[in-house]
Image (cartoon, rainbow, N blue to C red):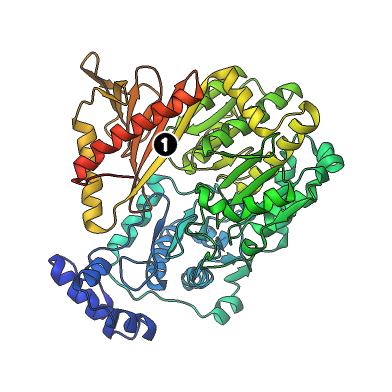
Amino acid sequence: MISEKTAPKNMTLEHRVRELYKLWTEDHYFDLATREELLQLRDPKEIEERFYTDLEFGTGGMRGLMGAGTNRINKYVIRKVTQALADTITEQGAEASKRGVVIAYDSRRNSAEFALETALVLAANGIRAFIFDRLKPTPELSFAVRFLHTIAGVNITASHNPKEYNGYKVYGEDGGQLPPSKALRIVEKIQSCADWFIPVLSRQEAEERGLLLPAGLDVDRAYYEEIKKGMLYPELSKTKGSKLKIVYTPLHGAGNESVRGILHDMGFTSVFTVPEQEKPDSEFSTVKYPNPEDPAAYELALKYAMEQRADIVLATDPDADRLGLYARHQNGSFQSFTGNQIGVLLAYYLLSQRQKLGKLPNDGKLVKTIVSTELGDAVAAHFGLDTINVLVGFKYIGEQIGEMEQKKSGSFIFGFEESHGYLAGTYARDKDAVQAAALLAEAALYFREKENKTLPEVLEEIFQLFGYYVDEQVAISLEGREGKENIAKIMHYLRTQKPASFGGLKVKDRHDFLSRKTFNFVRGEEQEMGQPLLPPENVLGLRFEQGGFVMARPSGTEPKIRFYFCLRGNNMESLKQTLKNVKGDFLEVIANVLGSPSIK
């Protein structure tokens, strides 16, 4: 009976855990592997951790450790969340169900299975599901929603997280990740449904009823064409692209086919793909973290880059929405680029060359997140563009594109976030590492052929023009219920204390993006944040008198709190030392809040 499969309500935590554990280990709705996994658990704290809460669905979807239980990613949690999504679609009428949902997945364990589970739950609700037959980058999923005119999209991915994780991202009909209001509607549906028995259609019946359909090659071709439209010097790439030596690693993920395909089509035929990391591998066996932000992920790629005398090294994360870069100096050594530096480099290339070609509109806009470098604002202003700063999450950059189109005011040129996410143009509403790889290859070729400069030299040129900036992100993992409490403790401390300085830099003011108030430490005054107001978000920033900031932000999809540092100065070496001092002082304060001897 369905009533036997409902989650207990109005119970103590202990009672909830006991009853849910009993349900999941005894009811045959849950498969044998799930029941056996739970029955083998011996630690009561582990059982409590698995059932004390339901895995949270945030504005970016949900992400978590794979395993059995309500606080883990598994097919039963996938079914329940998909049912909530289906409920919001059927409420919109028959036309919404007919438009359907397009589904993609990455190379992680269970990703293909979870994608099919998603499709079959949608089918059981009479909603058409278009599913890719192989791995696809997240940005192609964003594009596919728009191209196929579906009502929504789902991507099964945990992006750059360790192999133990998987996730579920939901996209709206504009191709962007759901904004908070629509995500909240799904959360409400999840919370209103205590039942764990979710109807699932068989694959055969779904196909026979025309409810399970392939997302075909026409999507691939159209996606590639849109990327190629955004290139500035296609003829240069066709004639000289083979001279640029590129080492590329997909880090065992979904980017290999797309990145290599677009580069080859453009004329970049001297691409060496790291053989050990070329094929999809759910264990990510050659890296600890499949993350282009992590220098350790480039160990193999850099070895081959030295052997091949490559000009640039490119890396994409498992769902190919983030891109990392190393580039060779004239002396043969390789320089790493932070996500902010790549964003600024791409912005400078796009704006300078579009201006040169007479393709830079007067109402052009650069959009970036509030935690991304202020150097981006300086570059945009130099070329006459306004910068729009949005909350963390590329969905907010996508929202700005939509608003410009709706209001017919402003031309989106480029958007970036410090966590290695970039987009030029409006064909998608999410960051695109495939496009960014193409743009960086073209930029490297242009600067080498036309100005005899390497990308490190171009970055130095930008610093000379606008001042030196350094940036760094520190993420602290705080898992479980205790972790959530500690994250809340950190944010409360930062909201209530009045620090004088960090690393010798005086703190000027505090920006609380949750209360949307600014407190000036010098004058001792609090006031409303200036217009335009951003939506409330649990982010807090401390700004320094000489410019720059440190910001704190709990992750919406991971058990982490992130700290973002951005400083400005006139000399890179002294600036790096200042950053080290500021970071050291700040993290010492955080360690004291947590009662920890140190944080690294």
Give the side of residue 60 with respect to residue 347, left or right. left
Query: In the rendered image, is residue 197 in sight?
Result: yes
Query: In the rendered image, is residue 146 in sight?
Result: no
Residue that appears at 61% across and 64% down? 135
Q: Nearer the viewer, residue 277 or 308?
A: 308
Give the side of residue 67 with respect to residue 308, left or right. left
> Where's residue 505, x and y in %?
33, 21
> Where's residue 534, x and y in %?
38, 32
Which part of the image, by quadrant, shows the C terminus?
top left
> Where's residue 463, x and y in %?
57, 23
Picture quadrant where residue 219 is located: bottom right
Picture quadrant where residue 593 is located: top left
Location of residue 587 with respect to 176 vertically, above or below: above
Residue that protrudes farthest toward the top in the picture: 523
Location of residue 194 with respect to 40 vertically, above or below: above
Residue that appears at 19% across and 76% down? 19
Q: Nearer the viewer, residue 532 or 26?
A: 26
Amino acid on which disc 1 is placed: Leu
Which residue is the site of mark 1? 391
Location of residue 587 with respect to 469 vertically, above or below: below
- Label 1 neighbourhood size at 10 Å, few (<14), some (14-19), many (20+)? many
> Where's residue 266, x and y in %?
79, 46
